[in-house]
Image (cartoon, rainbow, N blue to C red):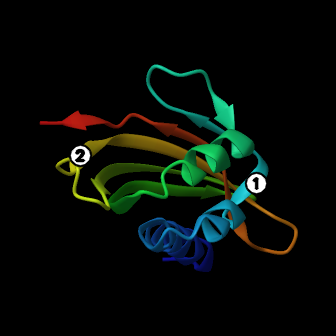
């Protein structure tokens, strides 16, 4: 495994841990300013909309697991394909946990300072019953 592959895997681990901790600032620091997210049933959205949605989720606990199926580094760009499972649990216990699972395709860009950041993310998660 190359240093770049290790750094990208660490970015994913950090993203999941920060999401679980409710640390929106850390999650935002892991994406480019021009990041674009694509999810089923919505128009693509950027970092500002991601931040607004994250702020609206302060009343839930989020736990996720990512299984990276493919990771390719191509110079200062990389992509990864993964299976993601996210469980969202209301903090007040007002509803049962909701589980979402599916495939993702993520494009990352290596910045001038050497950090890898998420630039594009196609997230195909659907609710599980």
Indicate whether 103 appears above or below 79. above
Residue for point 35% across, 41% down = 103
When asked about the image quadrant of residue 74, the answer is bottom right
Instruction: Say which of 117 and 91 sits in front.
Output: 91
- Which label sits on residue 70? none
Label 1, residues with CA under 10 Å away: few <14, some 14-19, many ≥20: some
Q: Nearer the viewer, residue 95 or 87?
A: 95
In the figure, is residue 33 to the left or right of 77?
right
Residue annotated with mark 2: 98
Image position, residue 15 (x, y; %): 52, 66
- Describe the element under mark 2 as helix, strand or loop: strand
Please, is residue 47 above or below residue 125 in the view?
A: below
Front one among 75 and 128: 128
Q: Which residue is mark 1?
A: 32
Q: Residue 36: horizontal and vertical position, in percent?
A: 67, 38
Instruction: Report how far apart the C-alphas of labels 2 and 1 lie in the structure.
Output: 29 Å
User: Residue 9 placed where, x, y %?
Assistant: 49, 70
- 2 relative to 16, above or below: below
Q: Left of 15 or right of it: where is 40?
A: left
Q: Is residue 37 visible?
A: yes
């Amino acid at each position: 495994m190359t240093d770049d592959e290790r750094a990208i895997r660490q970015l994913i681990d950090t993203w999941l841990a920060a999401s679980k901790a409710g640390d929106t600032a850390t999650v935002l620091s892991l994406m480019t300013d021009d990041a674009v997210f694509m999810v089923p049933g919505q128009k693509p959205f950027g970092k500002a909309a991601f931040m607004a949605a994250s702020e609206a989720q302060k009343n839930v606990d989020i736990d996720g697991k990512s299984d990276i199926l493919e990771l390719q580094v191509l110079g200062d760009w990389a992509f990864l394909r993964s299976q993601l499972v996210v469980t969202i649990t209301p903090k007040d216990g007002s509803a049962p946990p909701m589980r979402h699972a599916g495939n993702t395709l993520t494009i990352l860009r290596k910045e001038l300072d050497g950090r890898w950041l998420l630039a594009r993310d196609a997230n195909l998660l659907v609710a599980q019953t």
